[in-house]
Amino acid sequence: MRIIWMIFGWLTSVCVWAATPLSVSEVAPGVYVHLSAHHWPDRANHGEIANIGFIVGDKCVAVIDSGGSPRQGIALRDAVKQLTDKPICYVINTHVHPDHIYGNLAFKDEPGVRFVGHHKLARAMATRGEHYLSRAEEVLDIHVNQDNIIPPDLQVKDTMTLNLGNRDLVLTAHPTAHTDNDLSVYDKNTGTMWLADLLFLEHIPVIDGSIRGWLAELERLEHRRYRLVIPGHGRLVNDWPAAMQPEKRYLAELSDELRAMIKQGKTLEQAVSSAGLAAKSRWQLFEQFHRKNVTIAFAELEWED
């Protein structure tokens, strides 16, 4: 009897969770965002740690990043349906990391939906998918399989414009920066730039691509003007480009320090133990990500011309 009640309780909790639409805020006309707190992805938060949301046009809706778990994807889908009767026509994945793609399956059966991503996203999913899936239950306490890794139907090689009905979204495939498959989404109607993980605020930037490439992209983006910028992690930005300066500073200082250490003949182990520590007080989750950043950046800068 106890087992039966345990199963009943589990089913009830799942049903209640799934029936509750994700909380979102309209941050610009027709632009809805769910802001997440800064957490290490674990079994308590199920990897639901990224800013996700959607944009509504006169004809249809574009979802931007589907969430860190299948359940969050369902909740996001329900939030769309609660706020509009427009169909979902696009699910845009800004890059390969699980906190942005694990909700994809919730949208798979939506009539006419197309998945959109960087032209390198499918390859990244194929390369990393098996590892991500093998760790999901242990690390995040979520149940996923290959069906949850949905590659893009539409691949962006440079730029692509999606029309949602009197609303154009300009998608840009960036050179290697945060990852090698970063995609940004610009809403012309409101001047909103959805930068996703090209921009971190408060949460330490996470290098999974190229420190040099990321700095180069920030240099280009810095000279553009946006009314609103939505980061992958952190608060909404109304003070662009001032808001991106801490991220730029962290990457630039780390780059300069590592170049100096390499020139002095220091080893990777020495760099990991000492490089960039002055920035510790400025960032949340520093301990969890900084040493990995050092390792990746050192390997890149060691071989630069």
Image (spheres, rainbow, N blue to C red):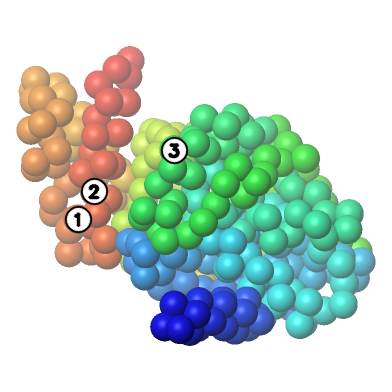
Q: Tag on residue 287? A: 1
Could you say which quadrant of the image residue 279 lies in? bottom left
The quarter of the image holding the N terminus is bottom left
The three-letter amino acid code for the residue at tag 2 is His
Q: Quadrant of the C terminus?
A: top left
Q: Which residue is mark 3?
A: 131
In primary-sequence order, the first of circles 3 and 1 is 3
In contact (CB < 8 Å): disc 3 and disc 1 = no
Percent coordinates x, y for residue 128 in the rendering: 49, 35
Residue 148 in view (yes/no):
yes
Chain-order first, disc 2 or disc 3: 3
Residue name at image x 9 percent, y 20 percent: 265
Q: Nearer the viewer, residue 242 or 46?
A: 46
Residue at (40% x, 34% y) in the render: 210
Percent of width and height locating residue 230? 56, 65
Quarter location, residue 47: bottom left
Secondary element under disc 1, as helix, strand or loop, is: helix
How packed mark 3 is, by other alpha carbons closer than 10 Å (few <14, some 14-19, many 20 or more), is few
Which residue is denoted by mark 2 in the rendering?
Answer: 290
Amino acid identity at mark 3: His
Instruction: Name the front one of labels 2 and 3.
Output: 3
Do callouts 1 and 2 mark residues in contact (Cβ within 8 Å)?
A: yes
Q: Residues within 10 Å of mark 2 (few under 14, many from 20)?
A: many
Q: Position of residue 250 (x, y in %)?
A: 28, 50
